[in-house]
Amino acid sequence: MEQSVQFANIIMHSGDMIQVNEFFTLKESKGKAVLYWHRGEPISHENTPTILMQALQIALPEIHIYPSTTDINNVLYSFKSYIINYFLVENGTYNIIQDYTINIDTDRLAILKDVHAKIIMHHKKLNNKEQNDYIDFWNVAFNKYLNACSCGSVESGIESLISCLETLIVNSTTEVTYRTCLFGSIAYTADTTKRKETFKFLKEMYNIRSKVIHGDIESLKKTINKNNLFDEYMKLKVIVSNILMKLYNKDKKEYIASIEKSLFECPPTT
């Protein structure tokens, strides 16, 4: 049995065909990517569409994964979701995230395959009865990231992404905001200028997150009633997905200790 869905925001060159594995293939149709699921028997982690969709969410963080098909009974169609800015209304309608596109090439395919393989391994470990304590910090962060990709509202998406970042790189209950922004900027990039920019950006996103969880609605309206909020949500998703995969199969305490060590070993000021 074969099912397919189109991704209008994943761009492919004419005639391109990309095989993710023996069960999933991306083919070009009118410049867009069509995903074909060659369902095999028995059902395995390798041929489960849920796991592939999760890999797409992480490997292509610059876009909102939005499958479309005329067949509502299609299993792949069930992964369709919206991200809406309910605080921004244009011409009587809510602002919906949909204008972001990405070209998928051999480099991006390599990333997708790597992410897909790691998520398959993650699910296999979760299903291993001998390792039922495998639900660790990474699994919690992983689920928070996926929730941010399908939660319905952009402010809730930002809240989930910041919470995901906290889970990944903070192990203290003090100065959580500062630690998340500082450690997040260091984990994301080695470039000093980009670290400063990332630190400032994460603080801005933290401000939105705080307004959401504390119910500061009037202040929240002023903050997120703007056209570029989706840009900021996407930028945050790129940062968090990058750090999420860097921490895959890593010891959280050791990773945080390495960041702290680098800070303490920096040259003295004069």
Image (spheres, grey):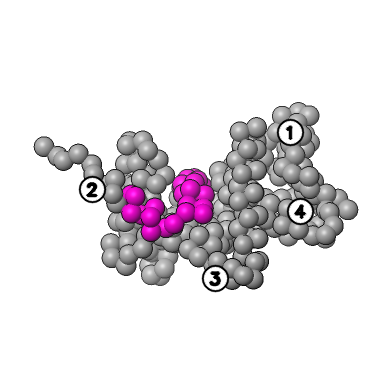
Work out how far the residue at label 3 is from the one at label 4, CA to CA, in angstroms: 25 Å
Q: Amino acid at mark 3?
A: Asp
Mark 1 or 4, which is nearer the eye? 4
- Work out whether residue 237 can be spotted: no
Q: Is residue 232 left or right of residue 210?
A: right
**Dot 3 corresponds to which residue?**
133
Q: In the rendered image, which residue does mark 2 sit on?
A: 264
Distance between mark 1 and mark 4 Cα atoms: 26 Å
Report helix, strand or loop for mark 3: loop
The CA distance from mark 1 to mark 2 is 51 Å
N-terminal label among 3 and 4: 4
The answer to if 108 sits in the magenta stretch is no
Furthest residue in direction front, as rendered: 130
Residue at figure coordinates x 74%, y 50% from the top left: 68
Mark linked to residue 7: none
Mark 4 residue crowding within 10 angstroms, few (<14) / some (14–19) / many (20+): many
Residue carrying label 4? 47
Whole-Å distance between the Cαs marked 3 and 2? 34 Å
What residue sits right under mark 1 in the picture? 31
Residue 130 vertical position relative to residue 26 in the rendered view, above or below:
below
